Amino acid sequence: MALPVRTQLKYWSIAAAGFFVILWFLGDVILPFVLGGAIAYFLDPVADRLERLGLSRALAVAAITLVALVIFILMALLVVPTLINQAVALFDTAPQLTSDLQEFLTRTFPQLGDTDSTLRKSLLVVGETIQAKGGQFLETAIGSVSSLINLVLLFVIVPVVAFYLLYDWDNMMVAVDDLLPRDHAPTIRHLAHQIDLTLAGFIRGMGTVCVILGTYYAVALMTVGLQFGLVVGAFAGLITFIPYVGALLGGVLAIGLALFQFWGDWLSIGLIAGIFVVGQVIEGNFLTPKLVGNSVGLHPVWLLFALSVFGALFGFVGMLVAVPVAAALGVLARFAFHQYKHSLLYRGVSERDNT
């Protein structure tokens, strides 16, 4: 005999509360394990496909690890130092860019040339603030990672956790399935399948889209000759998972920098604008339909809300788990609405009598 609904809700509420308490107190400690789990989840379909081609699970995981190691080494040697240097340089040159903008506005609008002009003072404040806050942000980000989690340990633990989770992924899924309440196992499996489809479409699909577009933007902008093309392209690709925001912010930043660097060279400025237009065409017509599909079910507003709430409550780890939790809550909400629409509370006694 199944437990009463009220008792079941009590147990599930306690489990959910325990999850958030653990996330609150152990957020920084479990960061390597969250990252390792995310990597294993992302790569599990690749391992399954290699198994279908005839490799054992161990050989499939070993092949994936070798390729990932090569990519990591190349990124660490070639891309990451340049990315950091360009980011720091961009923050350092903010006052000069602001000064150039001020001179441009003064030439265009001579009435704004007064040294006591509010616009002049505001632009100076903006430039100094960007420089101070930008440098402070980088120092805080690097310092916080170094203090809360030893950076060396982070790079050691994450690959090890990802390796073992990827190797044992199928066995873990069988063990979890064996622990499901027998009365609710079919429903839980159905909901878990829907959540997996949502996460697969978003995390795997949009993650791949972000990498492709980030690489495209960075390479194209550097080819055109934009001074901070790598960091702008990486930034635009990183936030592409929010529809239109990545191209909009990245395009505004790139075109703004291009106006200072290539003023008068309208061909170069037009090429930079065209890069983002082409990127949007490729994303909207090819990448997103093929890699993500139309059934993801994560509305951009809901996604932003989840990122904001979990980031504010649980910090960086909260932002990492915001997407899967948002996907799970979305699936559960749709399931609850479906149940409600077929319940007596919604249909009423009169409709039941008519049927």
Image (cartoon, rainbow, N blue to C red):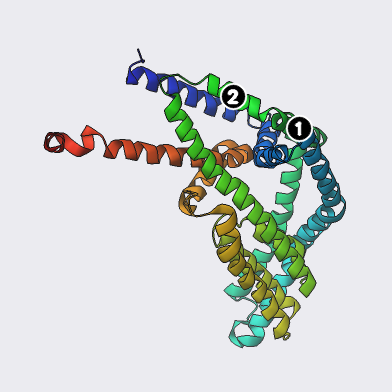
Asked if 288 appears above or below 254 in the picture, the reply is above
Which element carries disc 2, helix, strand or loop? Answer: helix
Q: What's under tag 1, amino acid-wise? A: Ser
Asked if 203 appears above or below 14 in the picture, the reply is below
Residue 312 in view: no
Residue that mark 2 sits on? 174
Classify residue 309 as left or right of residue 37: left
In the rendered structure, find residue 22 and report the number of the disc placed on it. none
Marks 2,1: beta carbons within 8 A: no
Q: Residue at x 56, y 23 (%)?
A: 176
Rendering quarter of residue 151: top right
Q: What's under tag 2, amino acid-wise? A: Val
Rendering quarter of residue 94: bottom right
Classify residue 269 as left or right of residue 227: left
Classify residue 352 as left or right of residue 185: left
Q: Quadrant of the C terminus?
A: top left
Residue that mark 1 sits on? 56
Mark 1: give few (<14), some (14-19) or many (20+) Cα within 10 Å: some
Residue 157 in picture, x, y percent from top left:
77, 31
Residue 119 in picture, x, y percent from top left:
59, 74
Q: Nearer the viewer, mark 2 or mark 1?
A: 1
Query: Earlier along the polypeptide chain: callout 2 or callout 1?
Result: 1
